Amino acid sequence: MAIVAAAPFREAPDDVVDEILLRLPCPSSLMRAAAACASFRLLVSSPRFLRRHRALHPDAAAPFLGVFSSVPAPGESGAAFHPSDPPHPAAAAARDVAGAADFSFAFLPTPPDAERPGWLVRDYCDGRFLLDRASSCSAFDSDIVTDLAVCDPVSRRYVLLPPIPEDLAASADNPLGVLGGRRWCEPFLAPADAEGGKDEEEPSFVVIWTARCPRKVVALAFSSRDGRWRALPSPDCFVWRRHRSPFSCPVHAVWNRRHYAHGRFYWADCLTNRWLVLDIGAMELSVQEVPAPARFWEENVAVVEGANGEVGVFAHEFYHANGNANLNYYTIPRDADGAAKSWRLEKTIPLPWSTAHGRPFCIRGAANGCLIIEVNQDSPRPFMSSSHDSRDVELFKIDVGRLELERVCRARCSGGVSDGWWPYFGFPPLLSLPTV
């Protein structure tokens, strides 16, 4: 019998392999492919491939990896990333990010004056962090107009923003304090898709800078596309006909809770049903009346992105009857003219923690339709407490899509209600593109 020699193995051309890998639907599939051989890893991690893959699979969003806090863990500097623990499906990727990223932000330039305070984390969005420090420009009050930097701790890249022009900075007359008096301005990042910059090859970003003055809110916007600051018109939001405006109160919780949903930022006053709204697309500030079904305290409310473009709200009562805790999820319908109607209850979510001797949980932050809850059952906090002491807690999340409680991790943390907490979404370092 004749023996037929096997045909020699031929490697698939690079362009064929490229097209095959592009059709893998999710980041976990790409990670498995990258682990198969060095050539696959080199291809999958290239910026050109990653941009093409995300354009082909726009719904393959960055997975939830953990929770980021602007307050460092006890004994550490910078800020704190709390990666999700097993058996969370993204625990391995979260651990990789925690090991690869520099959340101390030591790569940012240090001030020449050793006595000048260092960088403070002010916001996080789409893999970017916004930090500020006392201004190096002698023409400004360094406590009001601060130096600003946008950075990516995974790639260790950063951009220092140009100073705010003097004529714009001068409009912030006698602003009120935030962060317990550590700052007199509130800068924050706009999401990448709010101004249409999500799919650009060169990443762009928008920074909003606000200061609350006794008779107005000063708002400025910076776009990395043109590198310029510009002023936004201020609404007449500080004088109500029948009610004193909460926005002018230095300690009012409205200013401690900034929310975002579908192209708009919200500062919600649920006691007077008036919300300050910043439309990023139009770059306009306005005051809108949004009727609430109850007089919720602002720290017990979180506005989130609901399905189909709806604005969702998580809220819980100040007291919980019979020691049983519940969290309500609402949506805000609008009439034909676009005016907000009263919140509509969609679901009541029972929480497994007793409130008989204090409330062991609090709402910490929300982003991308995800709510973060801090739980400390060992030492339930009194209803009026806002402790800054170090504590061991468990962090949970609730997604708008499922509306089910899911454990994230156990963490040691500190900080009060005014400090920043954000759900952290991102890709493993191998699949990460620089965001600045």
Image (cartoon, grey):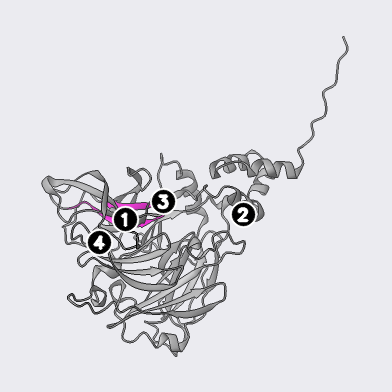
Q: CA distance from mark 2 to mark 3?
A: 26 Å
The residue that disc 1 covers is 333
Foreground of the two, 292 or 433? 292
Helix, strand or loop at label 3? It is: helix
Quadrant for the C terminus, please. bottom right
Query: Which region is colored magenta?
Result: 359-375
Q: Which x, y percent locates residue 319?
A: 14, 54
**Mark before the other along the chain sequence, 1 or 2:** 2
- Residue 299 is labelled as 4
Q: Which x, y percent locates residue 304?
A: 35, 56
Q: Which x, y percent locates residue 234?
A: 36, 79
How crowded pointer 4 is (Cα within 10 Å; few <14, some 14-19, many 20+) is rated as some
Q: Quadrant of residue 287?
A: bottom left
Q: Which x, y percent locates residue 24?
A: 60, 41
How crowded pointer 1 is (Cα within 10 Å; few <14, some 14-19, many 20+) is rated as some
Q: Label 4 sits on what residue type?
A: Glu
Q: Quadrant of residue 349?
A: top left
